[in-house]
Image (cartoon, helix red, strand yellow):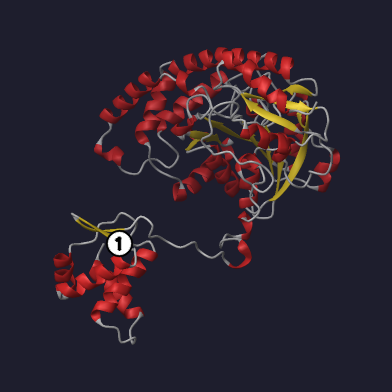
Amino acid sequence: MDFALLLNAFERTHRGRGWSRQRLLHECLRAAIRGGQLAPGTRLAATRVLAAELGLARNTVLYAYEQLASEGFVLPDRRGTVVAGSAGVPAAAPAAGGNGGLSRRVQHLRGVAGQDVNASVVFPADAMGAFAPGVPALDEFPLAQWRRMLDRAWRALTPRQLNYGDPAGEPQLRMAIADHLRAARGVVCDAGQVFITDGTQSSLDVCLRAFADQGDTLWIEHPAYGGALAAGRGAGLQVTGIAVDMDGIAPTDEDWHAAPPRLIYTTPSHQYPTGSVLSPARRMALLERARAAGALIIEDDYDSEFRHGGPPLAAMQGLVADAPVVYLGTFSKTMFPALRLAFIVVPAPLAGAFAQMQAQGAARGRVAEQLALAEFLRSGLFARHVRRMRRLYRQRRDALSEALQRHACAGAAIHGGTAGMHLALRFHDAAWDDLALSRRAAQDGIVALALSAHGTGNRMDEGAGWNGFLLGYAQVPAENMDGLARRLGALLPA
């Protein structure tokens, strides 16, 4: 802390009050403590040192310190004087209008997973345990091998690579991802179409900024992934919810005519949150109608690697030539969320312009992590890990399904368990309040997100009938499922 600068600034704003130097220093230090510039636990300069720095008599500083101590703002100890732990910043008054100064675009954003923070329990972003969605089996990740790859990447870095990186991502990683997607997901792309981001939410924000103008229409699924809803509203788009049924997103002719989209966000491999898988016929119809309407489909393939039943389904992006699809993927589910690496595959005709946009504002860094991930993909360890997790998640899915059948399915049905890392427990009775039941489950230590809280806002009254629980099972040992399902079932109405 530069006390001379602090005192000079304070003196300028209080000039004309006729305070003595003792009073001026006392008031200055007290204001700095109350305003948080001198935080609790901060050790103040010794009186002799501060007097010399400010050109004051030592008695002047002693007086100021003694006054602060008598008021409870500082505490003397054997090593000097420290700011008291109870001293701090008073609660700020709410801004006019109650929005804290936020823009109108974000005043209506939802809480975690699309839940209205005033209507339902909000779970922390790092929630773990049963049945937090989107969290892989972190204790099963080959951490020792990953550490070795990171170490090799850091040791191989050149001084030049410590500078800002390529805004599109490290070329080695982009090539490795393109090779993996062609082989494992049927995506038609080359490395020049692949762009690295720091997560799916970042990918969404970039795509909505790049491919739509404010006021354009964005279709998202209803019920929806809350991050897509937040991104659409934050970008100033007109967000329209399109109902989801057992076969995925189901736009009607009326939807195409009444609210033609510029962008269509969908999770076809495992709809979030219901777990529906978009049928092949629906996929082809959506591609054809989008092309005819001049719309782009944003295909979020967030957990497609974990297919538990039926034949593998290729990504929509590769189903037809020059598909109007922007493909999103992430390593948060296949590896671990803290990695913060995801990617966008942009249609070839748009890749050049997209690269120019990224060059002006994309984050540039994390070179070592990107190079380590490229090696992880190239070495075959990624594919081996995914195969092992697919077997493990299938076992855990089976254990949860069987336990729910025993304890919770008298008034509910299991839906969406053929893929991914979560399933939906859908209530037969639409009158059951899944928001209230979600709160009760939280009080019992169980994360069971309410399906109805994932609505888009403009279709909530149309009777889509999605109320129940979203249950993530990837991180829950199979032997724990029966007891957890019993506790969950005990919360449901008789």
Answer yes or no: is residue 47 visible.
yes
Percent across and percent down for residue 302 are: 59, 29
Q: What residue type is labelled 1?
A: Val
Q: Measuring from the top left, give residue 477's x and y in whole percent.
A: 55, 17
Q: In which quarter of the image is residue 265?
A: top right
- Residue at the spot of label 1: 74
Element type at marker 1? strand
Specify the quadrant that holds the N terminus: bottom left
For this rendering, which residue is in front, 413 or 287? 413
Number of residues whose C-alpha sits closer than 10 Å to that of mark 1, classed few (under 14), some (14–19) or many (20 or more): many
In this orientation, which residue lies closer to the viewer: 372 or 270? 270
36 relative position to 75: left or right: right
Residue 298 lies in quadrant: top right
Q: Residue drawn 32% across and 80% down?
A: 12
Residue visible at 41% across and 26% down in the picture: 373
What x and y, as percent, mark residue 462? 84, 42
